[in-house]
Image: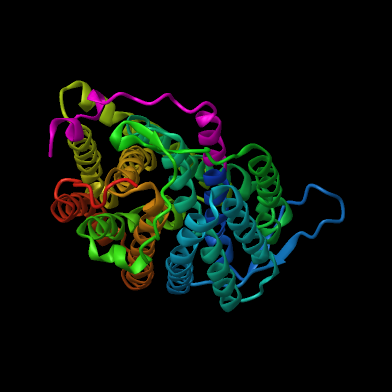
C-alpha cells in the first residue's frame, strides 16, 4: 500500500457537494422513525404480559379497560427472533433494490412498507398475530441502513463519512428516546393498540420531504482516487460473488457478533428495568430516555473519533480501527451490570455501553465504502445486515429462554461485554486491516 492510499489527507480533496448535510438530516429523521417503530413492542412488553390493562382515559367515554394477550418471556423472544429472521431475509433484496433503482426512489418505498407494517400491529389479537406483524415489519425495516449508507457514500468524502454516519445513526438513539417519551403515555390513556399507530404521521411527512428534496448527484466521486468521473457502466457482479471477498466476511462478522447487543438494548432494557427495579409503565420512560440520550454522544463522538486519530498521525484505516478499539473497550464494564443494586447505577453503566456501541456502529458501517466501490456499497451493507439480524435472531431465542428459566440477565451482560473485542479481531484479520477489495470504477 502506498502512502497516498494510507494517508488520504494527502490527496487533492474534490469540492464538497452542496446540500450534503441536508441529506444527512433526512437520513437522521428516517432512522429515528425506524427505531421508534421497532421499539414500541419492547416498551409495551409489561402491558402485553398482562391479560387486562386498566387505562386512565383523557376523553369522556373512552374505555377504561383493554384486553391484552398475556405474552410470556419465551414468546416475546420468539417474536423478536421472527422480526430479525425477516429482517435478515428482507435486507438482501432491500440492498439490491437501492443499488438498482437508487436511493431517491427506493428509500420512500422501503419507509412506506415498514410504516404500514408497524401500524398493522394494532389489528392483531394473539401472539401469533404479533409474530406475523413483526415479520412484515422486519421485511420493511431491513432497507433503512443499506439506503442510508449508500446515500452517505454518494454525498460525503471519506474523511466526513464516519461523522455523517454517526450523525444519522444517532437517529437510532433519537427514536429510542422519543418512543419512551410518547408510547407509554399513549398506552396509558388510549390503549396499547393506539400506541402502535402513533408513528404513521411521521413516516408520511418524511416520505414527502425525501421525494421533494433528495436528488442523486450527477456524478459519482471516486474519493479514493481524488478525482471525479462518470458513473461506471461496466456490468455489475452478482451479489453472491461478493461473498468471495474476505472483506465482506470481516464486515459480516462484525455485525453478527455486535448487532445482537443493540437489539438487546432495544428489546430487553425495558424488561430489565421493570423486573430488576420494579418500575411500572409510568416510571419506565425516564431511565430509558437517559440511556439513549447519552448514547447519542457516542454515535456522534464515535463518528468524529477517527479524525482525532488522523491528527495523531495515523492513516484513515488505522484511525478507523483505533476508534473501533476504543469503543469496544468501553463496552467491557457492562459485565458488572447484573450485580448493580441501584437504578441509576445501572443507567450510568448501560449508558456508557450503549454510547460505545453507537460509536462502534458508526465506524463499522463506514468500513464498507472504505473497502468497496460505490456500486457495491448497498449490497455489502445488506449482507452485513443479514449477518447482524441472524445473530440477533439466535440471541433473541437464547435470551427469552434464559430469562424464562433463570430470570437472570448475568449471562447476557457477560456476552455483550466481550462481543466487540471478538468482532474487531475478526474484522481486522479477515479484511487485512481494511484492505480495499475492489478498485473504484
| Residue in the foreground of this view, choosing between 36 and 441 | 441
Counting from the top left corner in percent of width and height, residue 322 is at 18, 36
| Residue in the foreground of this view, choosing between 409 and 149 | 149
In the picture as drawn, the residue positioned furthest to the right comes out as 61
| Residue in the foreground of this view, choosing between 396 and 390 | 390
Counting from the top left corner in percent of width and height, residue 331 is at 25, 44
Q: What's the residue at 58%, 65% (across, down)?
A: 48
| Residue in the foreground of this view, choosing between 414 and 342 | 414
Q: What's the residue at 62%, 61% (across, down)?
A: 113
Q: What's the residue at 66%, 44% (across, down)?
A: 211
Residue 93 shows in the view: yes
Horizontal relation, residue 76 to residue 257: left or right? right
Asked whether 13 falls inside the magenta stretch, the response is yes
Tag count in the figure? 0
What color scheme is it?
rainbow
Counting from the top left corner in percent of width and height, residue 81 is at 43, 70
Counting from the top left corner in percent of width and height, residue 329 is at 19, 41
Which stretch did the figure color magenta? 1-29
Horizontal relation, residue 47 to residue 382: left or right? right
Residue 278 shows in the view: no
Q: Quadrant of the N terminus?
A: top left
Horizontal relation, residue 68 to residue 312: left or right? right
Asked whether 286 falls inside the magenta stretch, the response is no
Amino acid at each position: 500500500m502506498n502512502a497516498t492510499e494510507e494517508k488520504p489527507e494527502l490527496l487533492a480533496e474534490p469540492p464538497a457537494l452542496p446540500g450534503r448535510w441536508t441529506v444527512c438530516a433526512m437520513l437522521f429523521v428516517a432512522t429515528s422513525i425506524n427505531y421508534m417503530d421497532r421499539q414500541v413492542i419492547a416498551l409495551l412488553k409489561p402491558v402485553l404480559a398482562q391479560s387486562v390493562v386498566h387505562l386512565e382515559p383523557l376523553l369522556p367515554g373512552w374505555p377504561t379497560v383493554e384486553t391484552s394477550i398475556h405474552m410470556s418471556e419465551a414468546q416475546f423472544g420468539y417474536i423478536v427472533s421472527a422480526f430479525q429472521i425477516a429482517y435478515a431475509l428482507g435486507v438482501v433484496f432491500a440492498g439490491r433494490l437501492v443499488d438498482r433503482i437508487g436511493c431517491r426512489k427506493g428509500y420512500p418505498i422501503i419507509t412506506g412498507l415498514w410504516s404500514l407494517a408497524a401500524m398493522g400491529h394494532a389489528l392483531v389479537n394473539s401472539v401469533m398475530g404479533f409474530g406475523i406483524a413483526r415479520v412484515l415489519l422486519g421485511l420493511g425495516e431491513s432497507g433503512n441502513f443499506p439506503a442510508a449508507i449508500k446515500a452517505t457514500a454518494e454525498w460525503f468524502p471519506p474523511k466526513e463519512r464516519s461523522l455523517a454516519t454517526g450523525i444519522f445513526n444517532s437517529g437510532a438513539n433519537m427514536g429510542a428516546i422519543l418512543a419512551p417519551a410518547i408510547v407509554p403515555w399513549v398506552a396509558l390513556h388510549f390503549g396499547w393498540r393506539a400506541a402502535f399507530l402513533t408513528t404513521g404521521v411521521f413516516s408520511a411527512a418524511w416520505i414527502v420531504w425525501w421525494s421533494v428534496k433528495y436528488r442523486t448527484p450527477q456524478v459519482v466521486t471516486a474519493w479514493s482516487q481524488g478525482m471525479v468521473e462518470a458513473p461506471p457502466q461496466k456490468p455489475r457482479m452478482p451479489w453472491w460473488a461478493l461473498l468471495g471477498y474476505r472483506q465482506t466476511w470481516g464486515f459480516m462478522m462484525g455485525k453478527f457478533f455486535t448487532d445482537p447487543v443493540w437489539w438487546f438494548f432495544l428489546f430487553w432494557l425495558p424488561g430489565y428495568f421493570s423486573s430488576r427495579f420494579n418500575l411500572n409503565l409510568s416510571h419506565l420512560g425516564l431511565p430509558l430516555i437517559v440511556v439513549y440520550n447519552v448514547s447519542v454522544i457516542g454515535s456522534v463522538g464515535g463518528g468524529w473519533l477517527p479524525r482525532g486519530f488522523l491528527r495523531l498521525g495515523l492513516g484513515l484505516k488505522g484511525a478507523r480501527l483505533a476508534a473501533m478499539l476504543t469503543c469496544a473497550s468501553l463496552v467491557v464494564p457492562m459485565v458488572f451490570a447484573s450485580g448493580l443494586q441501584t437504578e441509576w447505577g445501572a443507567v450510568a453503566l448501560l449508558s456508557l455501553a450503549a454510547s460505545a456501541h453507537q460509536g462502534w456502529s458508526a465506524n463499522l458501517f463506514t468500513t464498507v465504502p472504505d473497502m468497496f466501490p460505490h456500486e457495491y456499497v448497498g449490497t455489502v451493507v445488506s449482507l452485513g445486515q443479514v449477518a447482524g439480524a441472524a445473530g440477533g435472531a439466535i440471541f433473541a431465542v437464547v435470551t427469552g429462554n434464559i430469562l424464562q428459566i433463570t430470570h437472570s440477565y448475568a449471562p447476557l451482560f457477560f456476552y455483550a461485554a466481550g462481543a466487540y473485542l471478538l468482532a474487531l479481531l475478526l474484522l481486522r484479520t479477515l479484511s487485512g486491516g481494511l484492505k480495499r477489495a475492489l478498485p473504484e470504477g
